[in-house]
Image (cartoon, rainbow, N blue to C red):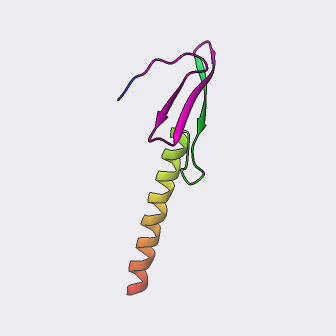
Amino acid sequence: MLALTRKKGESLVINNNIEITVLEIRGDQVKIGISAPKEIPVYRKEVFLQIQNENKAALNVDTLESIKNLF
């Protein structure tokens, strides 16, 4: 993991086309802004993990149904 120190208003760039900017620091919360091309999905980690789990569950159900339909 790369750890960087940034102040309010400072940014970092990833892969030449994603910019992350520190917008606000309030207590133990940091508000960030993300500028990325529309074709690059950006999710909060908890949402991303939920999507992955739902996709895995759907794949398992579809696989079971496909196997049942073979017989």
Percent of width and height locating residue 8: 60, 17
Q: Identify which residue, 9 or 55, lies in the foreground.
A: 9
Q: In this view, does 58 lie to the left or right of 35?
A: left
Q: Which of 49 and 68 is in front in this view?
A: 49
Q: Is residue 70 above or below residue 58?
A: below
Name the residue nearer the viewer: 58 or 20. Answer: 20
Direction left: furthest residue: 1
Q: Quadrant of residue 59?
A: bottom left
Task: Tell me residue 37's x, y (percent).
Answer: 57, 48
Q: Quadrant of residue 21 in the image? A: top right
| Number of numbered labels in the structure image | 0
Classify residue 64 as left or right of residue 33. left
Residue 55 colored in magenta in the image: no
Q: Is residue 30 left or right of residue 63?
A: right
Percent position (x, y) of residue 36?
57, 43
Check residue 21 for magenta coloring.
yes
- Quarter of the rendering occupied by the C terminus: bottom left
The residue sitting at the top extreme is 27
| Magenta range | 4-28
Residue at position x 46%, y 71% in the image: 62
Which residue extends farthest front? 16
Task: Write the residue at 36% across / 27% down.
Answer: 2
Identify whether 8 is placed above or below 51. Answer: above
Residue 7 drawn at (x, y percent): 55, 16
| Quarter of the rendering occupied by the N terminus | top left
